[in-house]
Image (cartoon, rainbow, N blue to C red):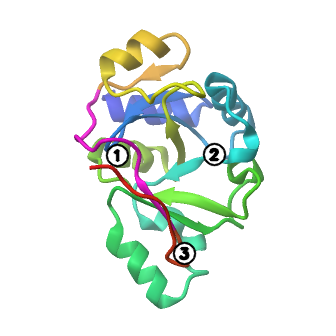
Amino acid sequence: MNEIDNAAACLQSGGVIAHATEGVWGLACDPYNDDAVRRILAIKGREAAKGMLLIGGGPTDFQAALEELTPKIMAQVLASWPGHVTWLLPGDAFPQSIKGRHSTIACRVPDHAQARGIASAFGGPMVSTSLNRAGEPPVQSHAQAVAQFDGVVDVVVPGETQGYVGASAIIDVNGAVIREASE
């Protein structure tokens, strides 16, 4: 079994993985598995009310949310994916445990082939929040991921970030930039 299939199988069985993304490492699970979501919150020491980001293997992973957009906004979202851009989309199709106190859901099709491959092999969107404990900087390398989270997560997927500095830009569907991407 290759690394992508192993990571996807872990997610499908309710596990939690650490994996590389464009700029930082991520902590991932099945967004519909409440135990896995609670485990990520505990690992991070994060408030559930903040919500979490989802990444997908392709835009079809977010089809229900995309269909709620105007054609113009949908075209903007699709033109930015895959990319280092997260959109706040209508969240009706996703669990409240992922949305937190928000009505929207943060979604991205990453510009990172391995991360997209894991989501595709998993079969849908997956939680992918930064790999760090609350208040600490995100993990930047496989060596850091292993040193800090081996034994805490079920699988640390070998991989590398793509040289972006920091997390992705976040844009809401009304066009407001919530956070600029660092490059």
Q: Please, what secondary structure does the residue beneath circle 1 have?
A: helix
Point out which mark residue 173 bears. Answer: 3
Marker count (numbered): 3
Residue at the limit of the structure toward the left, as seen here: 163
Quarter placement of the N terminus: top left
Residues shaded magenta: 159-171
Q: Please tell me which residue is depicted at 46% across the width and 13% down the height of the picture.
A: 148
Q: Please tell me which residue is depicted at 40% across the width and 52% down the height of the picture.
A: 168
Specify few, some or many for label 1: CA neighbours under 10 Å numbering under 14, 14-19, or 20 or more.
some
Specify few, some or many for label 3: CA neighbours under 10 Å numbering under 14, 14-19, or 20 or more.
some
What residue did someone put label 2 on? 31
Q: Going from the N terminus, do you reach mark 3 or mark 2 first?
A: 2
Tell me which secondary structure the magenta stretch mostly adopts: loop
Q: Please, what secondary structure does the residue beneath circle 2 have?
A: loop
Q: Position of residue 118 (x, y in %)?
A: 40, 42
Cβ atoms at labels 3 and 2 below 8 Å apart: no
Q: Nearer the viewer, mark 1 or mark 3?
A: 3
Q: Going from the N terminus, do you reach mark 1 or mark 2 first?
A: 2
What residue did someone put label 1 on? 117
